[in-house]
Amino acid sequence: MSLDILITLLVVASVLGALATNRLPADLTMMAALVAVLVAGIITPAEALAGFANPGLMTIAALYVVAAALRDTGAIYWVAHRLLGQPKSIFSSQLRLIAPASLLSAFLNNTTVVAMMIPAVQEWAQRLRLSASKLLLPLSYAAILGGTCTLIGTSTNLVVDGLVQEKGLPAFGIFDVAWVGVPVLLGGGLFMLLLGRYLLPEREGMVEQWEHAREYHVEMLVAKGSNLAGRTIQDAGLRSLTYGYLTEIQRGDKLFTAVGPEMTLQEGDLLAFVGVPECARELQRISGLQSAHGAVHKLGLNNHQRHLVEVVLSPEFPGIGKTVKETGFRSRYQAAILSISRNGRRMAGKVGEQMLRVGDTLLLETSQQFVEQYRYRRDFMLVSPLKDSTPPDFRRAPIAVGVLIAMVLANVVGVASTLEAAMVAAGLMLAFRCVTVNRSRMNVSVNLPVLVVIGASFALGKAMESSGAAAWIVQEAFPDSGLSPFMALVIVYLLTAAFTEVITNNAAAVLVFPIALGVAEQLGVSPMPFIVAVMFAASASFMTPLGYQTNLMVMGPGGYTFRDYLRIGLPMSVVVGAISLAVIPVVWGF
């Protein structure tokens, strides 16, 4: 063992330990590793930075812009509402959950899909009187499995494809991995439906308890030409909201207080909802509804500029003891009051006629500048923005969906590479104003740590190769004789799967990739089965919340523990591994 090999292995071991303990941010850990192998002279500066220009990394960055456009136009929410339907039992709920989650994850970032669907799953749990823990982990698993069905479904596939192209091997097509991904999805889905439900715990998650939360009275209007007109309340998805409920409908001079699920909506209906602050955000994401407060439209703000903010009135607020109308609140603060909560209780009646008191909590729709301008002013004791409260622009949703379909088709028919198709799609989303430059930049910035981890991982993988560490591991772990190609494939798969459970999936793929190539070269067989095995094993993270971000996202809302992941994740890993190892040699051959 040379000094370079020793240093590289020590750096890799340190990275594994740091990522497994989760004490330091992953991007900081990977950049520190990059600097270590660079300073030690194991790789050159050009090799250290080459990962940040990798086609796979740049494709992921472009897809973040595409995902932001699909979210900002409401296309994601519209598709989810249509596909999820109204399940009646736990079995049908899981079936209706797995199908759309896996389908969306095949073409969108699975983190975005899971974030979007968590509120819908919590609503199911409330309506079916089930624990959310029966549904949220299957949501994460379905998103992971769906992502393996296409090249763009998960960042891991794109990262491995980038490594493949660097080696001069043929690039993967968008559906090449579907030959393995679809059987894996079907097998994993059947396991969750038939056996997984008995292994899932029943626990209370972090759903907000209304009796201890601030209540608001929010009014929405069924707009002229709305797609909700002529549909029942049940079909419109308004019967069982996650954060509120429909109390009454004002139709002309008639007031309907006993609102049944079969009542048909009409244009111009004024709908009154009661709920927690997030109820307003939830209602904004339903296509066909618009705020009933004319003051919102008088603000002159575009959709991407609008945000929900809560403020608490201080004793120095100039409008204390006056009605909202008398204070001229909209003109003075450039904000529209949607609702007022006093002592945690909603204030019924017209907002403009409410007399303001010290301690009143106002739910506002305003610009993002409001928070910075009034956070430390004496008018308000507290200014608290609601996260991700920009209302979608549903008018541009068909354009966003059309661009997404065109991106996939362009790659499938061979008109453009995956990177070219993603870049053009991101540009079209900006050109058609499906997403603004600032919003797209913000979305990439939020995911910047992920991009840094991937870029730095390439440098560490290059160090494994340049130092001879990968070849040394192959020589020590894989004997020259008595090892069949299939058994070597099994070992590569298990090694990658073990790595991905304790570190990030992309880092695991990059680290094992040179080892997989070395094994194929030693055995004198095609490297493709081993490359695909790395691709699928790196995505097959089910046993811990650390290996895949979606697993971590559902941990809090589902009330899961590490033991829960191990109980259902271990057999899931066995099922997925067995299917992958059985199909890969048949499809790719040795």
Image (spheres, rainbow, N blue to C red):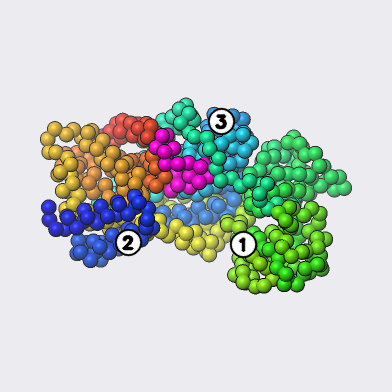
Q: Quadrant of the image for the C terminus?
A: top left
Give the Cα distance between marks 3 and 1: 37 Å
Residue at point 50%, 46% (across, down): 556
Residue 43: quadrant of the picture: bottom left
In the displayed structure image, the side of residue 253 where residue 402 appears, left or right: left
Closer mark to the observer between disc 3 and disc 1: 1
Region of the chain picked out in magenta, as a range: 549-568
Residue 214 can be seen, yes or no: yes
The earlier-in-sequence mark between 3 and 1 is: 3
Sort mark 1 into few (<14), some (14-19) or many (20+) by Cα contacts within 10 Å: few
Residue at point 77%, 69% (across, down): 319
Give the Cα distance between marks 2 and 3: 45 Å
Residue 259 percent coordinates (x, y) = 77, 39
Secondary structure at numbered mark 3: helix
The amino acid on which the numbered mark 2 sits, given as a three-letter code, is Met
Please give the residue where the numbered disc 3 appears in the rendered image: 90
Labelled pair 1, 2 in contact (Cβ < 8 Å) = no
Residue 390 percent coordinates (x, y) = 61, 57
Please give the residue where the numbered disc 1 appears in the rendered image: 384
The amino acid on which the numbered mark 1 sits, given as a three-letter code, is Ser
Give the Cα distance between marks 1 and 2: 34 Å
Residue at point 39%, 37% (across, down): 566
In the displayed structure image, the side of residue 554 where residue 479 appears, left or right: left
Please give the residue where the numbered disc 2 appears in the rendered image: 31
The amino acid on which the numbered mark 3 sits, given as a three-letter code, is Ile
Main secondary structure of the magenta stretch = helix
Residue 234 percent coordinates (x, y) = 69, 37
Secondary structure at numbered mark 1: strand
Labelled pair 2, 3 in contact (Cβ < 8 Å) = no
Secondary structure at numbered mark 2: helix
Residue 521 percent coordinates (x, y) = 17, 43
